[in-house]
Amino acid sequence: MSGAPSLSTTGTRGPDRSCVLLKHGEIFLKGRNRRLFTERLHDNLRVALRGIGGSTWIKIAQNVTVLGGQVPQEALVERARRVIGFNSVQPAIRVDSSLDAITAAAVRTLSAVVAQRPVASFAVRVKRRDKAFPMTSSRLEAHLGARIQEALDGLPVDLSHPGVRLAVEIDHKETYLSWARYPGQGGLPVGASGRALALLSGGYDSPVAAYRAMRRGLACDFVHFTGAPYTNASSTYKAYALARELNRYQPPGRLHVIALGRAQRQLAVAGAGRLQVVAQRRLMVRAASALAGRIGAQALVTGDSLGQVASQTLANLAAVDEAAALPVVRPLVGWEKQEIIDEARAIGTADVSVLPDEDCCRLLAPPQVSTRAALPQLHALERRLDLDELIAELLAGAQIMRPEADGEEDGDNGDGAGGTEGAGAGAQVGQEPPGLWVRTEAGSGARAPEAVRPSPTGS
């Protein structure tokens, strides 16, 4: 990790015991409910640490979480940066809260940083959680700055734009010294706002919408609609890869895959015409609402952006909402396309979304899509079908997959390792060596193309 000094890399006893400081985000404002949000945040952190390769510990301080363990500090930082709810992640060391120990650790830390990279200036910032400490924050900053300058041949102090900023946080028994600060995910802890079912296509929009819903505290399961049996399995491979990337930011949610092709053809045969796209979107939210009821989700999440395509006009969005039995959350409704693409790159889903696939939304799409679908016409169209029976058939044929982030399929989560559920023998999903597996209609395993495997990148 760039700029990290070569100090102790694990949580073992010694003059400098490494740890990671995790600064809380919005839960700082939650008043009497803060404890519940903090417990949820720490539960999610424990999930993110599964399979890390060693024991870890979590300590609670005032508006900060201290993380350590018998694993490299870099690994702790990487895992912690995935967890939604922390504003910043700081590699640090911890020493006894005495003036001599703090001074010696400050000199060692800055010396190690300077030995690794050129540093033109520095600053020391002190925060006292223990107000009984005998020196004020400003006096201790001046004291530590002077000792560091003595040890480093007069290294200049720059309080506005320092080359390295040494943060010193004094608690009652221990003091934490940090030399780097990385942005966290921010937001509310996943699950603090309930559970949602995200409609996941293979494009840029829906994965970003799911991520944004997670940042507002919604734990997400996923549902993907394919055009099977009239399209190939490429969109399923992409949906699995996208769900796996998104599950890096939350306790893993399940992916439900529903074959919509025959239902789409029934709509076309019933005379949908220009209403085809809106009618099948209504069918999707009906099926998703029924599925959400079964899994305990309280809302649907979609990647709609107002006016981006013909089916996402205000009139058409209202027509889709009328068919939903649950609230439809649209985190991207006011976003521009480039904003969505930039966010997809930041969270690691863009490389998957750009891959080609056979999207069910293009199947049987008319040359012109109605931009103002009228509800009476849609109701008349749907009366030609037995919607209850159609929805039951769609859900009966659904496949359930459990995508998990690379290196975390250790079986600790109560759901078992990644796999596929349903009738017949389950094919393993997400096992090493890397590759994606999904069940074919005959129940056999089919390996995804190498190009579909997402790279282990993150924000």
Image (spheres, rainbow, N blue to C red):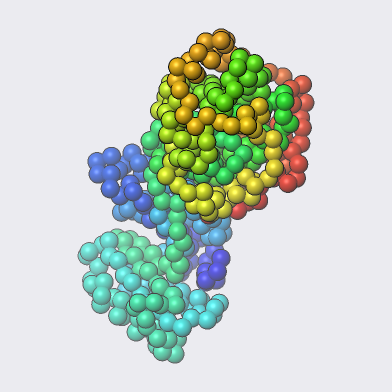
Residue 123 percent location from the top left of the image: 37, 77
Residue displayed at 36% across by 62% down: 174
Decide which of 105, 126 is in the foreground and name it.
Answer: 126
Q: Residue 419 appears in which quarter of the rendering?
A: top right
Residue displayed at 48% across by 22% down: 289
Q: Is residue 18 visible?
A: yes
363 vs 144: above or below: above
Q: Residue 66 appears in which quarter of the rendering?
A: bottom left
Q: Is residue 51 visible?
A: no
Residue displayed at 66% across by 19% down: 265
Decide which of 277, 108 is in the foreground and name it.
Answer: 277
Residue 216 percent location from the top left of the image: 40, 42
Residue 350 percent location from the top left of the image: 60, 49
Residue 292 percent location from the top left of the image: 49, 24
Residue displayed at 73% across by 46% down: 451
Judged from this view, the residue extending furthest toward the front is: 368
Number of numbered discs visible in the structure rendering: 0
Decide which of 175, 294 is in the foreground and name it.
Answer: 294
**In the picture, which quadrant includes the N terminus?**
bottom right
